[in-house]
Image (cartoon, rainbow, N blue to C red):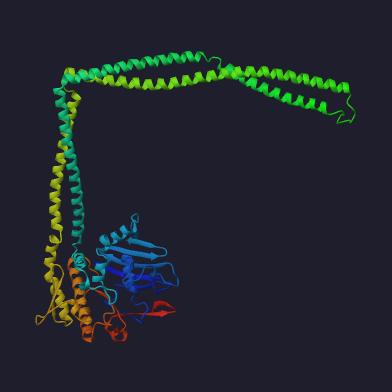
C-alpha cells in the first residue's frame, strides 16, 4: 500500500517563494475551499507533476513556473510503502528529478525517461492514467473510465489487477519471436549455402579423380612454362645488374666534374665583374680631361697611358672568358653524359625490383605446383581437399543442429506468447474479477440511489439497464448521473486495488464534484459513502465551503494575496 504523507511546493503556479505544505495522512476527510483562482486545485497538479512529470490539468511545463518569480519551482511528495520511506523531488529552472529511499538518493546514472520508468514500475506500480482513475476524480480535464478507449480501459484494469506485467512479458516475447525468426532465416540461408559449397567441393574431388592424368599433365606444362619464364627473368635480372656495375664505372669522375663546374662558374662571375669595372674606367678616361676630385687637367700622355692599360686588360679578360667558355661547355657536356648514365642506372634498379618480385612469386607458384603434382601422383585427391570437404560437412551439420534448436525454441516461445495474449491468462484473471467488479459498481450506484444495473464485459464495454430492463449507455445520461457512475467506478477500482494490494493507497482527491453535477440528494448519499471508508484520507475541493464545512473533519482555505496563493491562517 502507498501511504502518502505530505506534498509541498513553491514557485509553482500562483504560489510564491515560500513552501505550501499539505499533510496527506492526518485527517480522514478534508475540505479544500477558496475563491476561483485562489489555488485550491493546485494540489492536483503538484501531486501529478511530482510523480509523473506532468500536471493534472492541461498546463504546459513552462506555465507551471510562477510567472512573477520565474525560477526555482520545486514540488516534493513523501510517502511510504511497507517499511520503506520514499521522497520525490521535481523542479523546473533548474530542472530537478530526484528519488530518495530512506533518505538515500537513488542512483541517477540512467536518463530521465528510465528514471521515470523505474519510479512507475518498481516503486509506485502504477502510471499516470491509473493514478488519475484510482486516486483523483476531477470535473474539468479528467477523462472518466467510461470515456476511455477500450484499450485504455483494459490498461487501467490490468494495472489495478496487477497483471500488466503479463503485457510487458508478452511484448518481450513478441520481440523474442521476431529475433528467433530472423535467426532462423539467417540459418536457412547459411544451411543452403553450406549444402551448395559441399556439392561444389564434392564435384571438384570427383573431377580430380576422373581427370588425374590430365590434371598432372596440365600442371607439369604450367610448371615448365613458369620455369622458362623464371630462367628468362633471372637472366635479365643478372644482365641488368652487370650493366649497372659497368655504368657506375663510367661515372667515377662525377664528383670531379661537379667541382670543376662550380669552380668555372665562380671564375666566370669574377671575370664578368672585372670586365664591368675596367670598361667603366676606360670610359672615364675617354670622356674626361679633368680630374673630378682636384679639377686639374689630366695630362694627355697619362690619359693615353691609362686608357691603353685598361683596354689591354679588357682584352686579356675577353680572351680568358672565351677560353673559359669552351672549357665550361666541355664540363657541362660531360655532366649531362653522367646524368644520362645515372638515369639508366635508376631505371635498371626499378626493373630489377620488378623482376625480383616476379621471380619470387613464380618460385612460390612452382613450388605449389610441385607439391600438387606429387600429391596427385601419390593419390587422386589431396588430403587438403578431403579435409576441406569433411570440415564443410561438419559445419553444415552444426548449422542444421542450431536451426533445429531455434525452431524448437520458437515453438515454446509461441506457446508462452499465446498464454500471455489478451485472450490468454490475463482474460482468465479478468473473468474471475469481473463479477466482483460489477457487483461493487452496482452496490455503489445503489448507495447513491441510482437504480440502474451496469455490467462490464471482458472488453470493458458497458451494458446498462434500468429496473424495467430498458437499455442505456453512458452517453445517454445527464451529467449528474454520469458523475454517479464515475464515482461508483472510482470506489470500485479502489476496492479491487485493496483486494489485490496493487495500486492501493490512502489518498483520494475529489475536485469540484459537488459544485455542478451532483444534486443535494446525490451529495448526501456520496458523503455517507465517504464516512464508511476505512483508512482513507479524502480531500474534497469545492466552492461550497459554507454548505459543506461542517460535514468534514478538517478544512483548508486558499486565498490569493498580492497575486500569490497561500493557505489562509
Vertical position of residue 254 compared to residue 562: above or below: above
- Viewed as shown, does residue 315 lie left or right of 547? right
- Which residue is situated farthest in the front direction here? 287
Which residue is located at x 84 percent, y 21 percent? 304
Name the residue at the left extreme.
468
Quadrant of residue 423 within the rendered picture: bottom left
Pinpoint residue 142: horizontal percent, then vertical percent: 27, 73
Regarding residue 134, the answer to whether it shows in the image is no
Q: Indicate whether 514 appears above or below 319.
A: below
Q: Is residue 548 left or right of residue 476?
A: right
Q: Quarter of the image containing the N terminus?
A: bottom left
* Image position, residue 385 (x, y; %): 19, 26
Locate residue 481: give its quadrant: bottom left
In this view, 196 is above or below 92: above
Quarter of the image with the C terminus in it:
bottom left
Residue occupying image coordinates x 76% and y 25%: 279
* Percent of width and height locating residue 9: 38, 70
| Residue at 35% over, 67% down | 76
Amino acid at each position: 500500500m502507498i501511504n502518502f504523507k505530505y506534498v509541498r511546493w513553491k514557485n509553482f503556479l500562483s504560489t510564491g517563494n515560500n513552501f505550501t505544505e499539505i499533510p496527506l495522512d492526518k485527517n480522514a476527510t478534508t475540505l479544500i475551499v477558496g475563491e476561483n483562482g485562489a489555488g485550491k486545485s493546485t494540489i492536483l497538479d503538484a501531486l501529478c507533476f511530482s510523480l509523473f512529470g506532468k500536471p493534472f490539468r492541461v498546463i504546459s511545463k513552462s506555465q507551471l513556473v510562477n510567472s512573477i518569480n520565474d525560477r526555482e519551482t520545486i514540488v516534493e511528495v513523501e510517502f511510504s510503502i511497507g517499511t520503506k520511506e520514499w521522497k520525490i523531488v521535481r523542479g523546473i529552472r533548474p530542472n530537478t528529478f530526484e528519488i530518495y529511499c530512506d533518505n538515500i538518493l537513488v542512483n541517477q546514472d540512467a536518463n530521465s525517461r528510465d528514471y521515470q520508468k523505474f519510479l512507475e514500475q518498481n516503486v509506485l506500480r502504477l502510471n499516470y492514467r491509473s493514478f488519475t482513475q484510482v486516486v483523483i476524480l476531477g470535473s474539468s480535464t479528467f477523462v472518466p473510465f467510461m470515456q476511455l478507449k477500450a484499450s485504455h480501459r483494459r490498461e487501467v484494469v490490468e494495472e489495478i489487477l496487477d497483471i500488466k506485467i503479463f503485457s510487458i512479458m508478452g511484448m518481450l516475447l513478441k520481440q523474442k519471436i521476431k529475433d528467433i525468426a530472423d535467426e532462423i532465416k539467417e540459418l536457412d540461408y547459411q544451411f543452403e549455402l553450406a549444402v551448395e559449397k559441399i556439392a561444389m567441393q564434392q564435384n571438384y574431388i570427383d573431377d580430380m579423380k576422373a581427370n588425374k592424368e590430365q590434371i598432372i599433365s596440365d600442371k607439369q606444362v604450367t610448371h615448365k612454362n613458369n620455369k622458362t619464364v623464371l630462367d628468362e627473368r633471372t637472366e635479365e635480372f643478372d644482365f641488368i645488374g652487370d650493366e649497372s656495375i659497368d655504368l657506375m664505372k663510367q661515372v667515377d669522375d662525377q664528383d670531379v666534374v661537379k667541382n670543376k663546374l662550380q669552380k668555372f662558374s665562380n671564375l666566370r662571375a669574377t671575370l664578368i665583374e672585372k670586365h664591368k669595372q675596367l670598361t667603366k674606367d676606360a670610359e672615364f678616361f675617354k670622356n674626361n680631361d679633368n680630374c673630378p676630385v682636384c679639377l686639374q687637367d689630366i695630362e694627355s700622355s697619362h690619359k693615353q697611358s691609362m686608357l691603353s692599360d685598361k683596354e689591354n686588360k679588357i682584352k686579356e679578360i675577353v680572351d680568358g672568358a672565351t677560353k673559359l667558355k669552351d672549357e665550361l661547355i666541355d664540363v657541362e657536356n660531360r655532366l649531362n653524359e653522367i646524368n644520362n648514365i645515372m638515369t639508366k642506372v635508376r631505371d635498371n634498379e626499378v626493373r630489377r625490383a620488378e623482376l625480383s618480385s616476379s621471380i619470387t612469386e613464380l618460385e612460390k607458384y612452382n613450388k605449389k605446383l610441385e607439391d600438387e603434382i606429387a600429391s596427385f601422383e601419390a593419390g587422386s585427391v589431396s588430403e587438403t581437399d578431403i579435409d576441406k570437404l569433411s570440415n564443410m560437412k561438419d559445419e553444415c551439420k552444426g548449422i542444421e543442429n542450431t536451426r533445429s534448436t531455434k525452431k524448437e525454441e520458437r515453438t515454446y516461445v509461441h506457446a508462452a506468447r499465446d498464454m500471455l495474449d489478451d485472450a490468454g491468462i490475463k482474460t482468465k484473471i479478468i473473468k474471475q474479477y469481473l463479477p466482483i467488479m460489477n457487483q461493487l459498481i452496482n452496490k455503489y450506484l445503489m448507495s447513491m440511489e441510482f437504480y440502474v444495473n451496469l455490467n462490464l464485459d471482458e472488453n470493458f464495454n458497458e451494458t446498462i439497464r434500468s429496473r424495467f430492463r430498458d437499455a442505456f449507455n453512458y452517453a445517454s445520461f445527464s451529467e449528474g448521473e454520469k458523475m454517479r457512475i464515475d464515482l461508483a467506478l472510482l470506489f470500485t477500482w479502489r476496492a479491487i486495488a485493496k483486494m489485490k494490494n496493487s495500486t492501493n493507497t490512502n489518498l483520494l482527491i475529489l475536485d469540484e464534484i459537488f459544485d455542478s453535477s451532483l444534486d443535494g440528494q446525490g451529495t448526501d448519499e456520496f458523503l455517507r459513502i465517504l464516512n464508511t471508508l476505512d483508512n482513507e484520507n479524502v480531500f474534497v475541493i469545492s466552492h461550497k465551503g459554507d454548505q459543506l464545512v461542517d460535514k468534514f473533519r478538517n478544512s483548508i482555505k486558499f486565498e490569493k494575496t498580492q497575486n500569490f496563493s497561500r493557505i489562509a491562517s
